Image (cartoon, rainbow, N blue to C red):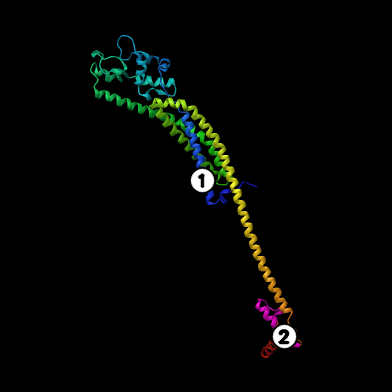
Amino acid sequence: MSEPDIAQHSECPEKIEQDKLLELSVKDSQRNSIFNAAANSKVHHAQLSDIGKYTPEKLGHLLRGGIRTGAGRTKAQTQQMLDKIPPSQRAGVDGQSAAAKVKEYLADKDASHITPHSKGGSSHPDNIKWESKTANRVRGNQQMTRQEQRRLDVKAQIDNLTGALEAGLEAAPKGAVVGALTTVPFSMLRNALRVVRGEISAQDAALETIKETAMGGGVGAATAFTVTAVATACPPVAVVLTAISPVLLAAGGTGMVYEFFKILDDHKQQVKEYYESLTQQDLQYLQEFENELMYTHSKNLEFLNEAEALNAEITNRPIESGVEGALKRYLESSAIAKSLGATPVGNRQLPSSQKSLSSAY
């Protein structure tokens, strides 16, 4: 027996239940895409060790920037100088790319003194702001005004936001791939089973798979963009993301295994419900057919009983002798036949006799 065409036999409540199961299954795929895309989002903020390893020439910029003579800064102060760079401008997917971002950001920057060195200002990080070389050298040995400080602070926030958005956009394609790869095998399985159950055609299944895969890719891209942008702009979030990445990856993998067996279980359940509903329909049909047979049989019995009584009435009539007696029986039989919608055998008429008998009776 071929697989049942469930869709053609399903009642409205069953169709609603199928739609709910389908919606939940699609949501499972999207959730797995979110977990996997987030787990594969990598954000690393540059450390001094990264600068020393990949861009050692910039380590001196941090260590002695703004210092004309004497010893350089301590390690803690050097770290402070690094932290003054907007977070997104010192972030990458690993130490090397993060160090490269620092090098790019500091390429046109001076360590500008708020209070000039010539007026007693120190080279401590608290008295330093990263500023373009042109603006710093135009000011010369003048005090940095509060307005100029606010402008630099706003510029740093804008640079942080811009860098975060750029990082998110760079991460989105990878997230889209992860989301699509997470979705497509389960979408193919789910829609193939829908074809087997007769819910949709093979062509519709292909279109649904493409649509669901695109949705999974979109969810993955959106997740990667959001997670990367936020983590890039906020180092504590990046630390947390790095810490929970294994957990997210495990959750995504577990979710995919669960989704696989859930799709199969839903398929088995829907096929089982179909066969149960089909059995109930068959029983109902047989009951109606049996009732119809019993009604027909009872009507036949009534007809037979009436026919038997009529036959007895005709057979048991008194037999009178002579021609007149025979004609009388003939007329009675004809009347009975006509009342039953029949015609006497031969349909012979005896007009003269009939007239005389009629007048006689």
Q: Amino acid at mark 1?
A: Asp
Q: Nearest to the eye among marks 1 and 2: give it.
A: 1
Mark 1 or 2, nearer chain start: 1
| Position in image of residue 106 (x %, y %) | 35, 19
- Give left or right: position of 190 versus 298: left
The amino acid type, in three-letter code, at marker 2 is Leu
Which quadrant of the view contains residue 114? top left
Q: CA distance from mark 1 to mark 2?
A: 81 Å
Category of crowding for the residue at label 1, using alpha-carbon neighbours closer than 10 angstroms: few (below 14), some (14–19), many (at least 20): few
* Residue at the extreme top: 70
Where is residue 236 shown, x and y percent of the image? 40, 25
Label 2 belongs to which residue? 327
Give the total number of marks visible in the rendering.
2
Instruction: Indicate which disc residue 19 carries.
Output: 1
For residue 107: magenta? no
- The kind of secondary structure element at disc 1 is helix
Q: In the picture shown, does residue 230 fall above or below 346?
A: above
> Crowdedness of circle 2 by 10 Å Cα count: few (<14), some, many (20+)?
some
- Give the residue displayed 50% in from the left and 34% down from the top: 32
**Magenta segment, which residues?**
322-347
